[in-house]
Amino acid sequence: MKRRDVLSTIGALSVGLSTSGVTKGEVLEKPYKTIERELETDILVVGGGTAGSIAAIQAGRTGHNVTLLECQSQLGGTITTAGVAYPGLFFAWGKQVISGVGWELVQSAVELNGDSLPNFSIPHGREHWNHQVRLNASVYALLVEEKCLEAGVNIRYYETPISVEFKENYWHVETIGKGVHAVIKCRQLIDCSGNALAASMAGYDVFKEKVTQPGTLMFKIGGYEFESLDLERLKVAYEMAIDRGELIRGEFRGDIVALLKEKGDNVQHIEGADSTTSETHTVANIKGRESLLKHLRFLKKQPGLGNIRIEEMRTETGVRETYRIEGLYRISYEDYITGKVYPDSIAYSYYPVDLHNTEGVVPEQLTEGIVPTIPFRSMIPKRSKNFIVAGRSICSDQLANSGLRVQASCMAMGQAAGAAAALAIEKNVTPADLVMGDLKTLIEMHGGIIPKGGNSFKG
């Protein structure tokens, strides 16, 4: 290009810059404006965690239009975002008790990552973690999203409900997301939020304990040889740091040795961790990360731990317990530990009573042959219509909930909820009026296992 042509081009650009500030190849955007949407779907699932993603897949596989709201960036909830990537238990007393969509995903994740399943034929005794299936959380996140899309589910990330109203036989759910405000009209609504958010917005009664279980930030530490540490000296230094107010005993259950022996994992306790609102969840996340950071700094000063490091940390503090619904039936501790079977039992839930508190946790193992079950009525809020709850927010007392809240059980509940919502549309009834035989048959058609017989499970 000749010199005078270059100067001419620079002159033209200067004129453009002086008028709009936009150069060639750039587009001047209009002032920001929230996008308004009006959408309609057969089934709306609120929450894409352990239960919600499975509910959406199951409902989608029946051929219905399904929309899934998730306020985070990925599906899987406790398994993926919170990092508790061992969603047991699926087997009890030598026999499989939970299967279906969730088990399908677990098997796929194990296979894709080149992992292996435990030998479920060997009794786990009091060490139930020997039957936990360890997953790669990232692989699971990829697969659960793929299964949702294959089932035709419309996923809406970064979106949460702000109002829920039932009118003219439809639910109208107002949502807010990143740059989007929507009103979603649906025939059946499934609340898998983990804190009964949609149920509360709809006006149904919810409750929680005065003192809820602590939360946990999952992480992995390394850079040291545990066998070479002077543990007695470390314990003394730890107690001195607690006395000075530098560390809080309850944050790692008062056991600094366990923190190092387990290299992190599921050992932290954050009192009052609550995911109900963005504000309470922010506090839980900050407390979890602050706790890890101050303990890391303390440990780094101790002999043999100068090179200690964080190798992995999840994005948020996992929450064990918030709100539960007042449902048509409340599962009691006695129901749970005796393995009560109800006429409307739609899933098993095999896990010890696992109540975490300030002292830690001592799981109460179930008596041999006992496998608790979940009645469909516990998933239906009182006075509700066309509304189902799945996951840890179902109607139950705290001790029963401490066992049935784990992921395998939530997967089974999610599948039952997805099947029930689809069947209720086809039968033109509210879920509470479904013929249980029809619902159980549909669940079994999609690989789920339905409880049979009396209170003693025969393996």
Image (cartoon, rainbow, N blue to C red):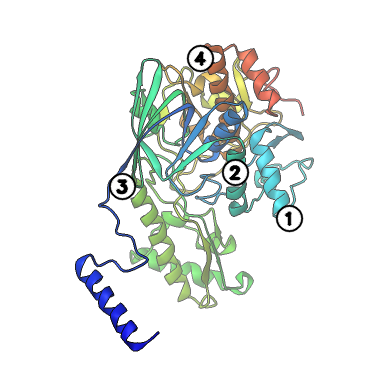
- Disc ID at residue 279: 3
How far apart are labels 1 and 2 at the CA level? 17 Å
Mark 1 or 3: in front is 1
Q: Nearer the viewer, mark 1 or mark 2?
A: 2
Q: Nearer the viewer, residue 124 or 320?
A: 320
Task: Please state, as top left, top right, bottom left or bottom right, where the N terminus lies in the image.
Answer: bottom left
Q: Position of residue 153 (x, y in %)?
A: 54, 36
Q: Which residue is mark 4?
A: 432
Q: Residue furthest right?
A: 121
Q: Residue at x 47, y 27 (%)?
A: 41
Q: Please tell me which of labels 2 and 4 falls first in the chain.
A: 2
What residue sits right under mark 1 in the picture?
114
Callout count: 4
Q: Which residue is label 2 attached to? A: 144
Residue type marked 2: Val
The residue lying toward the viewer, choosing from 58 and 63, is 63
| N-terminal-most mark, 4 or 3 | 3
**Lower position in the chain sequence, tag 1 or tag 3:** 1
Q: State how far apart marks 1 and 3 are (Cα).
A: 40 Å
For badge 4, the amino acid type reads Ala
| The image quarter in which residue 413 lies | top right
Q: Nearer the viewer, mark 3 or mark 2?
A: 2
Q: Secondary structure at mark 1?
A: loop
